[in-house]
Image (tube, rainbow, N blue to C red):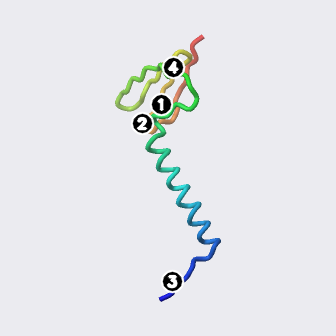
Amino acid sequence: MKVPRLNTRRRTLLKFGAVGAATFVLGKVFGPSLNLFGGSWGGQVHDFKNFRVVENDKELAFYDQLGNEILILEKE
């Protein structure tokens, strides 16, 4: 019984798709623990029922439940 070979273009497409999917999954798993840009994030987060307040050295930011920015106040 002879097994038919896949087309080389299809095999390449499947290979790139598998590598892309694996990269995406690994990025989702290890992304929060990686700090690629250096430095530390020393902000304070206050969660309320309908919004979230994030305070760091440079600004005070307000976000809604979905994470959209409502207001950002810069400290000067």
Please name the residue that numbered disc 1 is placed on: 63
From the image, tell me which residue sits under label 4: 60
Name the amino acid, label 2: Gln
Instruction: Report the residue that reaches farthest toward the left.
Output: 49
Graded by Cα atoms within 10 Å as few (under 14), some (14 to 19) or many (20 or more), the crowding at tag 2 reads few
Do the residues bearing badges 4 and 1 touch, measured as CB atoms within 8 Å? no
Q: Secondary structure at mark 2?
A: loop
Rendering coords of residue 47 (x, y %): 37, 27
The answer to whether the residues at label 2 and label 1 have Cβ atoms under 8 Å apart is: no
Image location of residue 6, percent across then percent down: 58, 77
Of marks 3 and 1, which one's residue comes earlier in the chain?
3
Q: Which residue is mark 2?
A: 65
Q: Is residue 7 above or below residue 44?
A: below
Type of amino acid at the residue the image marks with label 3: Val
Q: Nearer the viewer, residue 72 or 1?
A: 1
Q: Give the Cα separation between the discs numbered 2 and 1.
A: 7 Å
The residue that mark 3 highlights is: 3
Cα distance in 3D space between marks 2 and 3: 54 Å
Residue beneath the point at 51% across and 21% down: 40
- Mark closer to the observer (2, 3): 3
Q: Which amino acid type corresponds to the residue marked 4 in the rendered image?
A: Leu
Q: Residue at x 55, y 55 (%)?
A: 20
Where residue 75 sits, quadrant-wise, is top right
